[in-house]
Structures are given as C-alpha cells and as structure tokens.
Amino acid sequence: MDVLDAAGFDLILIETVGVGQDEVDIARTADTTAVVLVPGLGDDIQAIKAGILEIADVFIVNKADREGADRAVAELSMMLDVSEEKPWRPPIVKTSAPSGAGVADAVAALERHGEFLRESGEGAARRALRARARLLSLLAERFRRAVEERALAPDGLEEAVQSVLGRHEDPYSAAERLFGAVVGGAPRREPVS
C-alpha cells in the first residue's frame, strides 16, 4: 500500500480473506472500509465477534439473491440501531456479483463515504491518526532492533531476561534500564541481587 501510494495512485483497493484481527488492522490503514458479508455463512456472527461493526464504513451483503439476504440486512440494521451513534451511519447495500445487481449502489455508497470524509474533516483526522500510528510503529520496530543488537552488551536484553526470570528485577525496571542503555538518557540501575 505504501508503494502504491508513493507511486501516486489515487485509489488503492485492499482485499482481505476474512473477518479477524488482520482485517481490523488493515481497516486502520484505509480511508473507507467496506465489509462484505454473505448470507447463510455465519458472517453475521463473525462480524459481531471481530468488532467489524466498529470498522465498517459500508456494509455490502453479497449474493443477495440467496435466501437469508433480507434477514442479514435487517439484523445488521438492528445492530447499527443499538450501537453507539456516530456522525456516519454505514449504509447496507445488497449486491449480486454474477448479475451485477446492486454494484452501482455499492460504488455510490463508497463515494458518499468519501464525500463525507472530505466535507466533515474526518478524512484528514483519520489520515493524521494513521500517520501518527505508522510513525510510532516504525519507531517501536527500530527501538526493538536497537535493543536486540545490543543484546550481548553489558545492559543487554538477555541479561534483562535472566534478571526478570530470576525475580531480581521487575519487567518495568528492566525495560527502563534497557531503554536508558539504548537512548543513553535514563540512569543505569543495577539489578537487585
């Protein structure tokens, strides 16, 4: 996604394989998240379990020609009715990919969400949160590598692990000591013997 964004693509579609934590993580990187559910496959239960209600900007009930599609739409609508009220209520669109029914409605719903993001300022706020989270993630990774690279040094990771395992030091103190060794600012504390 970073490469495609840097290459100047205006629209990047990311498809995931299911409903779970990976999808929640990916949704945090997207401007608009469409959650596609299929009636009769237990997707509604998965949606509730995985917290998908909180991340969906548009719900698409695909295979709407199947039995249970109207029930799935009604259940989603009821769940949205009892969820925390937000400035944007995710629309629920029924589609049937083989016939193309509802596809234009799904595209229109996605475009309406894009307009909402631009007009409300929510899009800029989401991008700022993503940039902050991305930078903190990269910094955390660099810090982790710096700690691992110094694992053989006197204040190294392995020594801290052993100190915590031997209950000579609590994890918080060990982490503070390692942090100080890497950034050079925190006072060095000797583990308790």
Image (tube, rainbow, N blue to C red):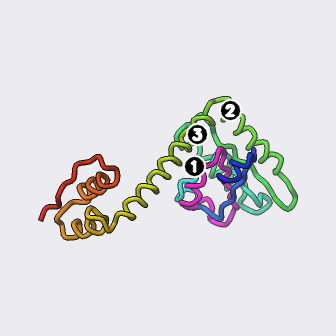
Q: Residue 77: give x, y in percent of width and height.
A: 64, 46
Residue at point 72%, 55% (across, down): 61
**Alpha-carbon distance for marks 3 and 2?**
11 Å
Q: Secondary structure at mark 2?
A: helix
Which of the marked residues, 3 or 1, is nearer the chain's N terminus? 1
Disc 1 marks which residue? 28
Q: Label 3's element? A: helix
Question: Which residue is the site of mark 3?
Answer: 126
- Position of 26 with respect to 99 (left or right) is left
Q: Residue 39 at x, y = what percent?
A: 69, 61
Return the residue at label 2: 118
Q: Is residue 40 magenta?
A: yes
The mark nearer the N terminus, 3 or 2, is: 2
Q: Residue furthest left?
A: 193
* Cβ atoms under marks 3 and 1 closer than 8 Å: no
Distance of label 2 from label 1 (alpha carbons): 17 Å
Please identify the quadrant where the C terminus is shown.
bottom left
Q: Quadrant of residue 182?
A: bottom left
* Image: magenta residue range: 20-45
